[in-house]
């Protein structure tokens, strides 16, 4: 982790008066900045709060919204709720995972461009199956339509870069 990011962790902990009672809020803010919680950040938080590293890790791993792995520049969330599942969201997830060459527990593409996640419900059941990319909702998706979106993002970034 870069020194700049560790300095930001120090700022966040200081803003919460280095109070261990604020551990969850501190971790949320660090993750909002860095998109994940690195080993270095968790260790530093433990030191600054005067608590064990095990305690910080137990909180970070207990809550599903915390991520201990680096995320891609674009976050894809495929809904796995009942309405989406019944309307075939799993083949969408599978097609994206295959396209991004994700295997096992790996959720982020090798190039660091995309992270693929499932969510229990996106709250858009009438539009099922639904996915989001960077918070933007895409309704009535198909595997082909999902892959077209990712290819479009890749081509736009290639042109911009």
Image: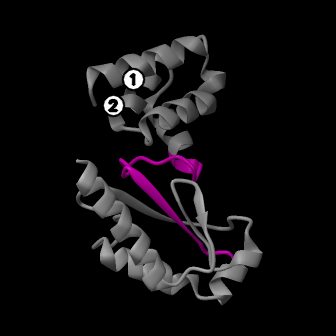
Percent x, y of residue 78: 55, 70
Secondary structure under tag 2 reads helix
**Crowding near the residue tagged with mark 1, few <14, some 14–19, many ≥20 C-alpha atoms within 10 Å:** some
Is 39 located above or below residue 154 in the figure? above
Q: Name the residue under label 2.
A: 40
Residue 31 at x, y percent in the picture: 49, 37
Look at mark 1 in the image and give the residue it sits on.
44
Residue shown at 77% from the left, 77% from the top: 126
Can residue 47 be seen by looking at this rendering? no
Residue at left 42%, top 54%? Answer: 74
- Magenta segment, principal secondary structure? loop
- Residue 86 visible in the picture: yes
- Position of 7 relative to 154 (above/below): above
Residue 25 figure quarter: top right
Q: What stretch is highlighted in magenta?
A: 61-81
Residue 2 lies left or right of residue 128; in this view the side is: left
Answer left or right for 101 relative to 15. Answer: left
**Residue 52 image offset from top left, x and y in percent:** 47, 28
């Amino acid at each position: 982790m870069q020194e700049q990011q560790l300095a930001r962790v120090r700022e966040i902990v200081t803003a919460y008066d280095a109070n261990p009672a604020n551990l969850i809020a501190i971790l949320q803010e660090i993750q909002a900045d860095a998109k994940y919680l690195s080993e270095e950040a968790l260790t530093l938080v433990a030191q600054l709060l005067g608590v064990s590293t095990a305690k910080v890790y137990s909180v970070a791993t207990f809550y599903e919204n915390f991520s201990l792995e680096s995320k891609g520049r674009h976050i894809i969330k495929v809904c796995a709720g009942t309405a989406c599942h019944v309307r075939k969201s799993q083949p969408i997830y599978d097609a994206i995972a295959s396209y991004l060459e994700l295997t096992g527990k790996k959720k982020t593409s090798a190039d660091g461009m995309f992270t693929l996640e499932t969510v229990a419900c996106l709250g858009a059941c009438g539009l099922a199956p639904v996915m989001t990319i960077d918070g933007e909702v895409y309704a009535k998706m198909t595997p082909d339509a999902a892959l077209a979106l990712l290819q479009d993002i890749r081509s736009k970034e290639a042109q911009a870069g």
